[in-house]
Amino acid sequence: MMELRIQLIPTGEIIMPPGKNGENYCHSCTKAVGSDGVRITMESALTARDRVGVQDFVLLENFTSEAAFIENLRKRFKENLIYTYIGSVLVSVNPYKDLEIYTKNHMERYRGVNFYEVSPHIYAVADNSYRSMRTERRDQCILISGESGAGKTEASKKILQYYAITCPASDQVQTVKDRLLQSNPVLEAFGNAKTLRNDNSSRFGKYMDIQFDFKGAPVGGHILNYLLEKSRVVHQNHGERNFHIFYQLIEGGEEDLLRRLGLEKNPQQYQYLVKGNCPKVSSINDRSDWKVVRKALTVIGFNDDEVEELLNIIASVLHLGNIQFGGEDSGIAYITTDTQIKYLSRLLGVDGLVLKEALTHKKIIAKGEELISPLNLEQAASARDALSKAVYGRTFTWLVNKINDSLAFKDESYKNPSVIGLLDIYGFEVFQHNSFEQFCINYCNEKLQQLFIELTLKSEQDEYEAEGITWEPVQYFNNKIICDLVEEKFKGIISILDEECLRPGDASDITFLEKLEDTVGGHAHLTTHKLADGKTRKVMGREEFRLLHYAGEVNYNVNGFLDKNNDLLFRNLKEVMCMSENTILTQCFDRVELKDNKRPETAATQFKNSLAKLMEILMSKEPSYVRCIKPNDAKQAGRFDEVLIRHQVKYLGLMENLRVRRAGFAYRRRYEIFLQRYKSLCPETWPTWEGKQVDGVSTLVKHLGYKPEEYKLGRSKIFIRFPKTLFATEDALETRKHSLATKLQSGWKGYTQKTKYRKLRSSAVMIQSWWKGILARRRAQRKRQAVDSIRRFIKGFIYRHKERCPENEYFLDYVRYSFLIKLRKNLPKTVLDKSWPTPPAALVEASELLRKMNMQNMVWRYCKKINPEWKHQLEQKMVASEIFKDKKDNYPQSVPKLFVGTRLNGEEINPKVLQSLGNEKMKYAVPVTKYDRKGYKARNRQLLLTSNSAFIVEEGKLKQRIDYASLKGISVSSLSDGVFVLHVPTEDNKQKGDVVLQSDHIIETLTKVAICADKIHSININQGSITFTVGHGKEGTIDFTSGSELLVAKAKNGHLSVTAPRLNSR
């Protein structure tokens, strides 16, 4: 049975791994993607819902339960599935670790794919917006929200990277892509900081438009920034840092640069950097980030002068923070750090004395007259901090405008590029102490929530109307009442705050709170300590007011509201900045401001107006939403803080969003997709449906037993109200898969085997016919060759005795070839083998040469194989052959017998004899019989041969020594006897006469003597008799006769008679 194997990949996508041969096959799937497996639609993921939850919160059965919502988040988070949908809204949980789900392969997996055909991912949202922009020609926007540390900035980066990689490109487009990507590190350096909740927290809201041409390529961009947290420049809470750029400059700046800017490589030396007591962060490498920022500034288009002036301003802010004032609390303040004034004068390009004066005095214009008023210590410090905030805030705005200039779309021929907007904005914030910044941020979130609910309901209503489904009104909390409470003219909180800031008299934060109580004290969504009941007063301060937001209650402390809202800079400080020689500051501080006596708008009004413009921008675009959630405050991977997440789910309005989405139908799909997936559950629709898609779906749901209240059929989609209905259908499909798999498997096996058989049969027939043809051609060719050979052979035989000619050359060559082949097979194997084939007449001479060469070769090989001992043996045999061959009867019998080194061992020779020999080395010893010269009596003796002499030995005596030099010759008969005579000179008194000896090894003994004495040619082989000298001139005779047996005796005539059997007739 075929097994359905699924695999969970890091994106949360469920895929079917490829088969052994790389094939992908699944009849329940709607799309296949290459060799990495089959992409399973969202419905297939439901089979694993108990382990990994559902990919879309809309499919939660208990959708009103916050606990079920959070439990689904927990399941997916534990499986590293950080993305989940609420309809088209993407919920993202920060994993606090790197996941391998952002590669180029993943981008390709989501590129051009239907939103619900893949698992939830930030790329799916990016691609869906891009395709909608391209196909519908309507501008899009992606709204990214969440609290600090939830991953908003990373989400916007991933979207930009997706567009940079997947969109069409050219040289010009690539430049825009690079600038879009490089704008991030620059804005992060100047606008992000380390907070208690996030090491890279965006301290400003950002809306970026990415402009695309008609080809879909990014050709430009524009950035809007909102509410930069300028107060961070002069103050940070414990454990937090100032903006990144300050630390990057100090840590990464070159020595020459820091020396020119008057800075030291120690953040602790600067008052604006020590208040948070956190100069170093383990997760941040300021040195490497500095290099990234410098490179990014170049890519964006900053020239060296602009970078220098920008860094002068950053350094001047640090020097401003180090300005110290002297004087009593109520007295006139004066500056005690002149060194800082010198640095500021050079870096800002202003007159030092004028700046010094402006920092300790303020200019007031009353009835057209200018009045100069000195400042006390507190006022001077506030003026210094206000200047620092103004310089940094306006420089940040200039920086954004500069980036916009570099991103601007400059092709005038194409005036209306399509746009995708990215809104990376702070989420709802509730801290222990909430101030003016939290008030503005939460007001912004109220407006976005209002927009979100309106657009969500509108998109739902539009889809229902397009499909012909009756729209059922949805009950939801309309937060317009809260928005009006904040922004309404004359009665709203912002109007009251502005009025309190502008009115003459002694206005303060407390008077603002009192006026708030008087004006909107009766509002249902606002209360103060004074207006609250006893229970509420216990948890509220007297300087706080509470707003009941859509996401919950928030207490705001009014301390600092008026100062932050006014955000005023003394006129004389503005005048100093307008006189600056720094070109950036001259653009930031326009002289027109000095001539305009109209009071500038307050910070709250500016924010309200910019927010209104943002709402107009968003309303003109098709929105997509990304809601970012932080799983814990410790920034730890794998930790899921349920209390913190419940807090964010509430403040992000996710449950309200889900409730609105589930107010109607939980699930909807186009007919063709639904029918394609579930048609196997109905016999009438399986395997194919020939009629209309709507009729097929209607037949299918009736067979499945759907109740009328569970579904509706639209014009092109089926709407299913309850998730349990979809779950039941999916479970039935999972059960059905097994039987389908078996049936499909058998059918497929039958088909493949038949196909294989047909291919094999066709191949066999083709091979057979081809091979038969080859065999027939070969046989015909061999017959032709045989006929030709026979014809040439016969003709050659006829002309064999003639000179070589074309008629007989084949025959002659064949005869020669045959002889040579026969010779090769019958070559003699040993040197003793004298056989040789008879050659034809033409090869007689060549045959003789070959025979000699063969013999030489065999001899050479034989000689090469023999060892020294065998060589010595052969040399002796050669000597014996030379002396005795064909001359003595018993020679042939000696040939196969090996000559030994000696016939007597050391024990058989008397030691006295060996001692008598002295230094003479004995070469051979043999027992012999000696016949006396008188009477021929036989006596046993030993014959010893040395290098120089031969010795006749009797037991322990040396009876006779015969020097080889005096040996005249040796005589032996031609018969088979062993008698021989050693002839010695008679003149030698030491010698009594010739010596007659008999040896059983006559051939060996005489050969040894001949070699040792070098008397090879002195051996005489006699026939009949041998005459020898007896002594003193007398001679003796030995007569040799043939007989039947060997007999040696003295004859009657006084001769020695030797009778020997004839063994070989010569």
Image (cartoon, rainbow, N blue to C red):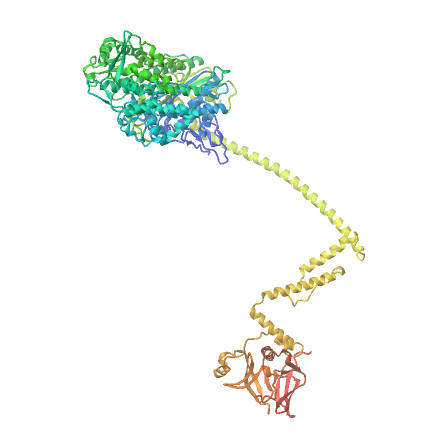
Quadrant hosting residue 396: top left
User: How many numbered tags mark residues here?
Assistant: 0
> Can residue 79 be seen at all in this image of the molecule?
no
Residue sitting nearer the eye, 1062 or 677: 1062
Give how far across and how far down residue 564 sits, in percent: 28, 16
The x, y position of residue 956, in whole percent, is 49, 85
| Closer to us: 400 or 272 | 272
Q: Nearer the viewer, residue 651 or 319?
A: 319
Q: In the picture provided, is 730 more to the left or to the right than 1052?
A: left
Q: Is residue 653 above or below residue 941?
A: above
Residue 532 in percent (x, y) is at 21, 14
Residues 338 and 485: in front is 338
Q: In this view, which residue lies farthest toward the top?
A: 367
Q: Quadrant of residue 140?
A: top left
The x and y percentages for residue 670 are 46, 19
The answer, for residue 245, to whether it is visible in the render is yes
